[in-house]
Amino acid sequence: MSLETADLEYVRTLVHRRSALVLDDDKSYLVESRLLNVARRSGCGSVADLIARLRREIVGVLHSQVVEAMTTNETSFYRDVQPFEALRKVILPDLIKNRAAERTLNIWCAASSTGQEPYSLAMLIREYFPAVKDWRIQITASDLSSEVLERAREARYSQHEVNRGLPATMLVKYFQKQGADWVIKDDVRRMIDFKQVNLIERWPTFPPLDIVLIRNVMIYFDVPTKKRILGQIRQLLRPDGYLFLGGAETTLNLDESYTRLPLERAGCYKLVGR
């Protein structure tokens, strides 16, 4: 049974106010399917009962669970391939040369979901740039959802998950088999600091950043939110740093401080004039 229009509008407003995610008018089925588990866990008989409870209660944990349930957590190892090829062939060699004196790299993977993106980056650095093994390399990985962050911290993946994009050589070298699952080895896990970050609320303190990956998330935001986030990233990015967006995302008509680099389908940007 479809949600009442007023209930759907309540969820859309709640989600937009708390996360800036925009749910289109035709997302009634998506709302119901994703909130069904939240309803069951909270003892509600239906999604409609859950929404009625949300309306009655002071905004709190249950409202946050609803917002987190509506986020999209699609990800895979080395997703889209081209950004990681650009990192391996162009971006990281350039930064390693420029940071040779300070021996430091700071990277932020925003909207990192269950961790495949930051772990892919960590393994890429380990595999192809052994000269920086003793550098201070900090990869901060963040997401809105506490549930997916917990999974990311565990670094445990099913056979199906490691089959999606992960080369067999990387699996053998950087994972350990535990039962039916694969767990990433500690030396790779230690490269990453996971944080819960809502992109429309106050961000944690970052050092000046060399690389920001915020891929496949801004497509869900409205234009003012996109502009604000790009502006905040601009303030954090070092003058010669790099920004990665998803294939369907752009800075065009949003922030003219960025220029797209001619790296095939990598979605890579630098600050203008740098």
Image (cartoon, rainbow, N blue to C red):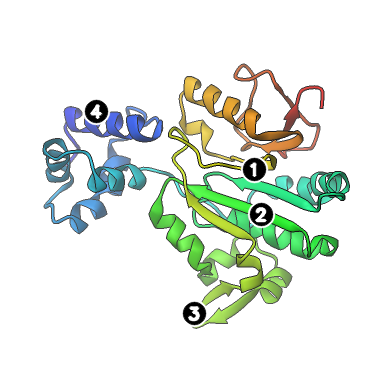
In the structure shown, which secondary structural element does the residue marked by tag 2 occupy? strand
The answer to whether the residue labelled 3 contacts the one labelled 2, judged by CB atoms less than 8 Å apart, is no
Compared to 107, does 28 lie above or below?
Answer: above
| Residue under pointer 1 | 207
Which mark sits nearer the N-terminus, 4 or 3? Answer: 4
| Residue 146 x %, y % | 40, 53
Say which amino acid is labelled 3.
Answer: Ala
223 displayed left or right of 65: right
Q: Residues within 10 Å of mark 4 (few under 14, many from 20)?
A: some
Tell me whether the residue at label 2 lies in contact with that at label 1, contact meaning CB atoms closer than 8 angstroms.
Answer: yes
Label 3: how many Cα within 10 Å (few below 14, some 14–19, many 20+): few
Residue 34 at x, y percent in the picture: 31, 48
Q: Which residue is mark 4?
A: 9
Q: Residue at x 76, y 51 (%)?
A: 104
- Residue identifier under label 2: 138
Q: Between marks 2 and 1, how big is the CA–CA gap? A: 10 Å
In the depicted structure, whether residue 79 falls above or below residue 222: below
Residue 78, given in percent of the width and then of the height, sits at 66, 55
Horizontal arrangement in the rendering, residue 93 relative to residue 43 (left or right): right
Q: Which mark is residue 180?
A: 3
Q: Which numbered disc flags the more N-terminal residue, 3 or 1?
A: 3
Q: Position of residue 171 (x, y in %)?
A: 66, 72
Q: Name the residue: 59% across, 25% down.
A: 231
Say what amino acid the circle numbered 2 marks: Gln
